[in-house]
Amino acid sequence: MFLMLCSLPDRPLFLIDKAPFAAPEEELPVSSYHEFRAQTRRRRRKRTFRRAVFVLILALILAALAWVITFIIQKITGEEAPQSGGASSSISAPASGSSSEGSGGAVQAGWNVVGPVEQTVDATITSPDYRMIALPENGRVDMSYFANTMIIGDSISQGFWSYNTDIKDIVTLCAYQSCGPDTIVNNGQLKNPQGERVPTQDDIAAKLAEKQPEHIYVLFGTNSIINLSDDAFFTYYEKMLDWLQSVVRPDAQIYIQSITPVTPEYEAERAMFTQDHLYQLNCRLAQMAFERGLYFLDLNTALAGDDGYLNPEYAAPDGHHLDQDGYRAWIEFMSSHTAYSPTIPYLLGSPYYQAAE
């Protein structure tokens, strides 16, 4: 028995799994642990940022889709109306008691009538910004528009006749050297574009009676702010408009234009022509126009450079008047900033163009 046991092969009596045990994990160094945590935070921030970008893009797509749908619906239903300059105080129609055809009358509204939004209640503006009241860009008009137009002003307005402008021979020009609203009120005598001394108010009245213009543009200020106080200037301006509105045709459109900008050199020599002072005067002019139901035209948009001064490309040598390019820019601006009227000859391609029947 003993021999048999001894002769057994050298094998274990029991089968034992000899697979090695897994080695214990090594602990990460402190620096590696902090780096791991930092990487985790960065990945979390990236995921959050991607989600935010996705939500923003989705919101923009939905907003654009809503705008397109609204625009298509308006086109289909024919409810599109002339733009009024957005949600600001910009207006392309007169105040209460006026119409899209001028300073008097009323427009019959209808679902299929193209026309401007109108102010239907009396309003008063406190501390206005003239840029918010100024007439926005509308449909472009044909040059024949100016055959039914009168321009009233001083030597700056005389430039429409002095230079070879597109409207020189068709517009009715009542512009007088060194003129202001006080001169018109007092019927003072000044030189017209042809160099003749005429009584200003009588001259304007005669041309109004003869031409019966539908569109009247008024520009004063550069002479008056030298010779008058601001309050006196506006007192005379109001009196002049009282007279003018009493003699024009009932449906006439009257545009009050902003005082034109000057060059820095001209401003440096005359304290009353600072940008701040001109801004205040133009705000009061815009307020006066709005409260009277008239239109306000911001000429700075057309004539000023990015710095707010008169664009050097449009400035005459004196830094105050305009050169020929300045008058071309002015005419271009007037051609695209008119108050809507069904009688205006809009160019083909303008939103309000109507083919001749």
Image: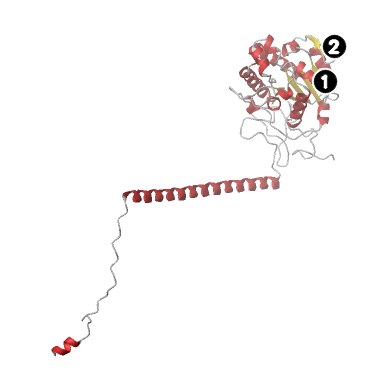
Give the x, y percent position of residue 63: 58, 46
Taking 36 as reference, is 141 above or below it? above
Direction from residue 56 to residue 348 in the image, left or right? right
Quarter of the image for residue 127 reads top right
Q: Residue at x 49, y 49 (%)?
A: 50
Secondary element type, mark 1: helix
- What's the amino acid at mark 1? Trp
Q: Earlier in the sequence, mark 1 or mark 2?
A: 1
Q: Which residue is mark 1?
A: 161
Residue 258 appears left or right of 160 = left
**Judging from the image, what secondary structure is the residue with disc 2 in?**
loop
Q: Residue at x 61, y 19 (%)?
A: 276
| Front-most of residues 62 and 287 | 62
Instruction: Report the mark closest to the observer, 1 or 2.
Output: 1
Say which mark, if any, is on residue 107.
Answer: none
Looking at the image, which residue sits at the far left? 2
Residue at (81, 30) in percent of width and height = 145
Q: Is residue 68 left or right of residue 108?
A: left
**Residue to which mark 2 is pinned:** 196
